[in-house]
Image: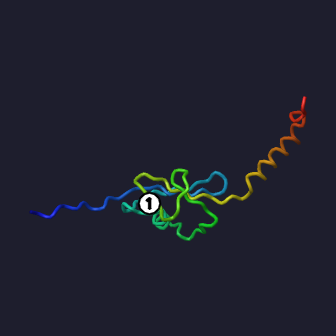
């Protein structure tokens, strides 16, 4: 009886997105072997030297670790670190609105 044919490991295509400050995003499509991890995708895309304590990682908006497995068509996302505390930013927006439209904040 002949040996069974073992198919070659198929390649997967993923997109690596890096969110810069503002609304700028860099996207790179890369090809990896099946079973590749987030870290392998980042390394192949040229982002291996990023400080992971300052940047978050995710796949389609869900937090992932560098050792998470990828699937064909995944979008690996590198999140920019927060520059301002969200609560403080909201407080500043409200204060600005109160200065610009004081009559809106008067209770009647």
Q: Quadrant of the C terminus?
A: top right
Q: Is mark 1 on a helix, strand or loop?
A: loop
The location of residue 85, given as percent across then percent down, is 74, 56
**Residue drawn at point x = 66 percent, y = 60 percent:** 81
Q: Mark 1 points at which residue?
A: 69
Above or below — where is 50 with respect to 71? below
Q: Which residue is the extreme one toward the front?
A: 1
Q: How crowded is mark 1: few (under 14 residues within 10 Å), some or many (20 or more)?
A: some
The location of residue 22, given as percent across then percent down, is 67, 53
Give the camera-side residue of 33 and 45: 33
- The image quadrant of residue 105 is top right
- Residue 89 in the figure: left or right of residue 38: right
Q: Which residue is the extreme one toward the top?
A: 108
- Residue 49 in the figure: left or right of residue 93: left
Count of residue discs: 1
- The image quadrant of residue 40 is bottom left
- The image quadrant of residue 3 is bottom left
Give the camera-side residue of 5 and 78: 5
**Residue drawn at point x = 86 percent, y = 33 percent:** 104
- Residue 84 in the figure: left or right of residue 13: right
The location of residue 21, given as percent across then percent down, is 66, 57
Q: Which residue is the extreme one toward the bottom?
A: 49
Q: How is the image coloured?
A: rainbow
**Residue drawn at point x = 90 percent, y = 37 percent:** 102
The location of residue 95, given as percent across then percent down, is 85, 45
Q: Quadrant of the N terminus?
A: bottom left
């Amino acid at each position: 009886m002949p040996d069974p044919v073992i198919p070659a490991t198929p390649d997967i295509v993923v997109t690596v997105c890096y969110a810069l400050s503002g609304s700028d995003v860099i996207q790179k499509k890369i090809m990896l072997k099946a079973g590749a991890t987030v870290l392998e995708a980042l390394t192949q895309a040229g982002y291996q030297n990023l400080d992971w304590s300052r940047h978050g990682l995710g796949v389609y908006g869900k937090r992932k670790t560098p050792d998470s497995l990828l699937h064909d068509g995944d979008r690996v996302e590198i999140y920019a670190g927060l520059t301002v505390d969200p609560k403080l930013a909201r407080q500043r927006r409200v204060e600005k609105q109160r200065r610009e439209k004081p009559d809106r904040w008067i209770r009647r």
